[in-house]
Amino acid sequence: MQIFRGFRHPGVAPASAVTIGNFDGVHRGHQAMLGLLQTEARHRGLPSCVLTFEPHPRDYFAGVARRPELAPARIATLRDKLSELQACGVAQTVVLPFDAQLASQSPEQFIDEVLVRGLGARYVLVGDDFRFGAKRAGDFAMLHAAGAARGFDVARMNSYEVSYPAAPGSDEGPRALRVSSSAVREALTAGRMDDAAALLGRPYAISGHVVHGRKLGRALGASAPGGTDGFRTLNLRFKHWKPAASGIFVVRVHGLGERPLPGVANLGVRPSLDPNDVNGGRVLLETHCLEWPASLGPEGAYGKIVRVELLHKLHDELRYTSLEALTAGIAQDLADARAYFAAGSAGAAGSSHAETRRQTTRDRI
C-alpha cells in the first residue's frame, strides 16, 4: 500500500475509487466498506484509495475551542490504522492534515479540489451518515448531484451490525448493535475486551517499536538485591494523549518469536512512578512477558516492532504508596494472568458474537 501525506504528490494515482473517513479502529463496518470498495475498484480497473485525516477532525475542533474533553478517545495510532488498511487490501491511502484550511473548505471546494482534481475520483463510496465540508454542510445528496455533473459514480453503504446473544436466563432474544468507532470506544473504555474484539473482528491490539524506559521494572521483584531479573517490560508509546483503553490487561505479544507470548501490560501514564522519568507525561504500554525467548537475550527486544493484543482487563491503573506495594501489586497481576491463560480463556476472545449481513445493503448511483 502506498501512503501519501496530502494529495499533491506525483505518486498519487491519476484516477481512483475512493472512500472517505476517519477509520479509527478499522472495525468490521469499515472492513465491509473496504471490501465493497475493492470489488468496485477491480470492476472499473482502478486502484482503491482511502482518504483519511490526521488529526481526527474532532481533535482539531476541541483544540480550537480549548476544550480537550470534546476530543474523542483514540482507538488506534496512525501506524495501526495504516497497517489495518493495508491488511484490507487498499492500494493507496492519502492522509490529509485536518487544519484550519480544510475545516473552512466548502463542500463544493472539497469535491472540486480534493476528490476531482486531487484524487481523480471515478467512484466514491461513503457511509450512511456521511457529512463533509465546512460546518458539515455537505451530505450524500450533494455528493450524488456533484457526481452526476462531474462524471463520477457515488454509492453509500448502510450500517453494519453484530448480534449479541441474550444474557443467561433472559427471556429476550439476541440484540443487534450497530458497529461504529463510538461503540468500540465505549467497549474499550468499559474494559469489555470481548465486545471490542467482536466489533473489530479481531482482538484489540497496539503495535510499535520497543523503546527504552526507566528500567525500574527489572529491579522490582528481582531475585536478589541489585538484580535485574525482575519485572522486565517492553515499552511502546501510544502516540495520542487520550487512549480509549487504559488499565492493566492480560495480553499476547507478537513479534518476538515464532509464537505469541503471554503477558501482562499497563496502558496509561503510570501514576505510581516519577513523572520526570524518560517517558514521563507520555501514554505508554508497558508489557511484561510471562515467557521470554532465550535467543533474544536481556536486551534483544529494543528497536523491534511488536504487536500487543489486549485480551482481558484486570483492573484500572492504581496508585501504589511504595515500591514494595507496587511490587506486590504486579505479582498479583501476573498470578491473575497465569490463571487466565490456564483457564484457556484467550482462545475464546470475541467468539460469542455473530455477524449479520445488513452491510451489503447499499444505494448504487
Image: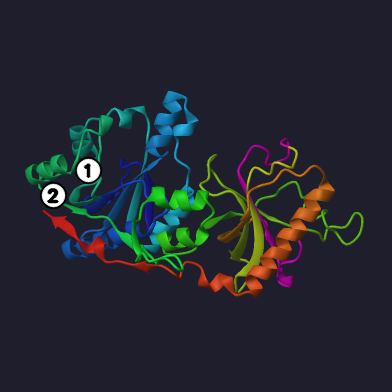
In the displayed orientation, state which residue is furthest to the right.
225
Q: How crowded is mark 2: few (under 14 residues within 10 Å), some or many (20 or more)?
A: many
Residue 348 horizontal side relative to residue 43, left or right:
right
In the displayed orientation, state which residue is furthest to the left.
149
* Percent x, y of residue 364: 13, 56
SS of the residue under disc 2: loop
Placement of 209 over or under 96, stated as above or below: below
Q: Which amino acid does label 1 sit on?
A: Leu
Residue 3 versus residue 321: which sits nearer the camera? 321
- Give the residue drawn at x 44%, y 40%: 72
In the displayed orientation, state which residue is furthest to the top.
65
- Give the residue drawn at x 29%, y 27%: 104
Residue 329 seen in the current view: yes
Query: In the rendered image, which residue does mark 1 sit on?
Result: 115
* Percent x, y of residue 44: 16, 61
Q: Does the magenta stretch include residue 339?
A: no
Q: In the rendered structure, are the residues bearing label 2 and label 1 in contact, judged by CB atoms less than 8 Å apart?
A: yes
Q: Is residue 282 magenta?
A: yes
Query: In the rendered image, which residue does mark 2 sit on?
Result: 152
Q: Residues within 10 Å of mark 1 (few under 14, many from 20)?
A: many
Residue 91 seen in the current view: no
Q: Give the range drawn in magenta.
A: 275-302
Placement of 173 over or under 116, stated as above or below: below
